Image (cartoon, coloured by chain):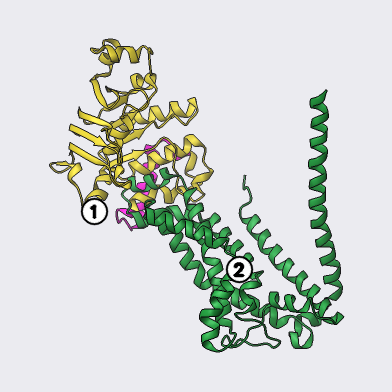
Chain colours: A green, B yellow
Amino acid sequence: MNRLILNKIVLLLSTLSAVIGIGFLFWILITLSYKGISSLSLSTFTNDLVEGGIRNLLVGQFTMALLASFIAIPIGMFAGIWLREYSNNSRLANVIRNLSDIMMSAPSIVIGVFVYALFVAPFGGYNGFAGVIALTIMMIPIIINTTDNMLSLVPKELREAGIALGGSKHKIIVQIVIKAAKVGITTGILLSFARIIGETAPLLFTSANSQFFTMDLTEQFPSLTVSIYNLATYPDEASRNLAWAASFVLTIIVLIINLMGRYMTRNKK
Amino acid sequence: MKVKDFNFTYAGVQEPSLKQINLPIEKNKITALIGPSGCGKSTLLRAMNRIHDLYPGNQYQGEINLYGKSEKSNILELTKENDLIELRQQVGMIFQKPTPFPMSIFDNVAYGLKLAGLKDKDELEAKVHKALQDAAIWKETKDRLHSSALGLSGGQQQRLCIARAVALKPDVLLFDEPTSALDPISTGAIEELISTLKEEVSVVIVTHNMQQASRLSDYTAFMYLGDLIEYDKTETIFMNPAQKLTEDYITGRFG
């Protein structure tokens, strides 16, 4: 009897916890959607921040994220490939692996401070390049980690089969192993992009923000996330509404990218 | 092939895993390596195409001589990448787990040929078709040559791996427990296939299935804890083994 009661209690508690957790999630999403959509209009997307829109912010955020990707993806992938396929799990390789994992959990604001000291202060002011660098620093460890892990999921027999046919190591890696891990690696890259496009702290005092539409990376550069940070605390209602609209748009963007990632890894059978 | 005074030690391990192995591999015959888990039969097989080289630090001693198209050569002495590649084109290997590459059926079979430098499309096509026929999988694949190899069943994938290996026209084929991951029907199909292959190649097969060894092979080598205990014609090993250890294993007293 005792066991049955205990079972019922635990079941009740777990269900309650799940409901509370999911409840908050839904509360956030519903509030975000309601407040966000009601503040959205066509002008939100055609105007820049100086005119009460988010056009320059969207372009700015994407630009910095894309530039960061161009640098981080090759570096991250090559490092991941070296770690898994060439290093033979040497001590150096494991040190690098651990460092990369630690960097993934490094506080993003610390990375911001680091980039500030190196790329903002000496150059006399906030600039977009510093923002790109900060995002790159955040992105590289994630890509190293997923590439390394996805490659480790490829069974060793596949490599052996390639070698047994007379293949050289690099041919096997490119033509067989990477191909076998292709979906996982791509998804990892996609998700790391989704992650950095939503980051605020690394941009706060590197590229800061700009009201105007600009593609000049030597100056302060427009950012969607930093704008939300600023707008949310302004006293006037128009700013706060814009913050909701921007938050909603950002959430939708990240959601779409995540869904793309899920779509790519769906079970095909 | 002839294995002579062969010793093998895995990287980081004190004791050798193979001790003073002397074993002939007869041409155009099937030689089975049997023995309980850990006896070294797979280790020995994998030395024959130097696939241990993928994992650094292993040590060889002795000779493994390949009597190929040219004179004999001790494959343990090969150091140049090109020589090793040539070795693996002459000594093919099929693994326990079917390993289709993530590409079409055609590309899978053509892979080794392309690695060897074959570029002429017609020749490639002819050789791929022939290989698929030799591996008894032509009928099931001829209408889907360009679909992914991953869509094949386990037994079909394994026959694809065999097609991939025979496309290179090797002298020796090494089979590492090729049917242990397959169902009985696929196993039967593959055993039949292996016995037809011996007309063109010499076969070495590692198996922990003694019925399979006695069905398929002409010669059998029984190994135990890194030593070659007994080697003889298969009928002799199974009907009239000379060593007591062999007899105990055959009759199932251990293993």
- Does the magenta portion include A45? no
The residue under the point 73% across, 66% down is: A251
In the orientation shown, which residue stands out farthest toward the left?
Answer: B71
Subunit of mark 2? A
Regarding residue B15, the answer to whether it shows in the image is yes
Q: Is residue B141 left or right of residue A19?
A: left
Please report the bounds of the magenta region as a residue range: B115-139
Mark 2 secondary-structure assignment: helix
Q: Which residue is more in the foreground, A150 or A50?
A: A50
User: What residue would you read off at disc 2?
Assistant: A108
| Label 2 environment density (alpha carbons within 10 Å; few <14, some 14–19, many ≥20) | many
Regarding residue B64, the answer to whether it shows in the image is no
Q: Is residue B63 left or right of residue B151?
A: left
User: What residue would you read off at disc 1?
Assistant: B82
Amino acid type, residue under disc 1 in the picture: Asn
Mark 1 secondary-structure assignment: helix
Subunit of mark 1? B
A108 above or below B188? below
Quick check: marks 1 and 2 in contact, CB under 8 Å? no
The residue under the point 49% across, 26% down is: B185
Q: Quadrant of the N terminus of chain B?
A: top left
